[in-house]
Image: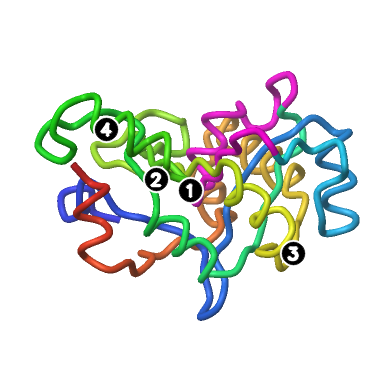
Amino acid sequence: MNDQNEPRRRIRARHTESTITVYQAYRPEIGGPAARTGRFPSSWKRDRMTWIKPSFLWMMYRCGWGTKEGQETVLAVEIEREGFLRALRHACLSHHVPALHGDRAAWQRQLKRAPARVQWDPERDLRLRPLPYRSLQLGLAGEAAARYADEWIVGIEDVTALATQIHARVRAGELESAAALLPEERPFPVEEEVLARLAA
């Protein structure tokens, strides 16, 4: 991908006509049962905010290729496209932007009401170095988190072994063969007005 032609903010993801794949990392007691059953276990907290990441490499940066404590099991969670889009349409940026929100108090009110929040973080290359464009993280709270866990999930795959394999090739300097193993992520279409409201 040519970095020069890449928009500063874009959702890139593995997706189909009806689903989008997002990534999360958990300790094995959560991740193992989730991958085996296709559902998060009862110990998964539905009343806490959960962050989902469409970018595989951003997830690798966050979890250290599945080596960080409490993030040893990397999950690819395939969810309904409509659920993801619904959350985006009702999301609020996680930081205050005066041109978008007006004063800070107005933004805080919006943030408190929103079932989801958006953060844009630098995308990463195979060595996990920041790139000049950003990828989305979507935080789900309250009803959105519960719907994510109980309604939107189509399937859950444990991709820890894949992460380990890619990491090993990166460490060996085999960047081409490492890149060949990456999930294929394409631009994910979202209404312009939704991105405009979230892309300041």
* Image mark for residue 155: 3
Direction from residue 26 to residue 48 in the image, left or right: left
* Image mark for residue 107: 4
Where residue 166 appears, as percent x and y from the top left, is: 62, 43
- Mark 3, other Cα within 10 Å: few <14 / some 14–19 / many ≥20: some
Residue 6's place in the image compared with 103, above or below, is below
Where residue 32 appears, as percent x and y from the top left, is: 87, 43
Disc 1 vs disc 2: Cβ atoms closer than 8 Å?
A: yes
Identity of the residue drawn at 32% across and 66% down: 190
CA gap between label 1 and label 2 equals 8 Å
**Residue 193 appears in which quarter of the rendering?**
bottom left
Dot placed on the residue nearer the N-terminal end, 4 or 1: 1
The amino acid type, in three-letter code, at marker 3 is Gly
Q: Secondary structure at mark 3?
A: strand
Q: Secondary structure at mark 1?
A: loop
Q: Which residues are magenta?
A: 47-70
Dot placed on the residue nearer the N-terminal end, 1 or 3: 1
- Residue at the disc numbered 1: 55
* Image mark for residue 136: 2
Direction from residue 104 to residue 53 in the image, left or right: right
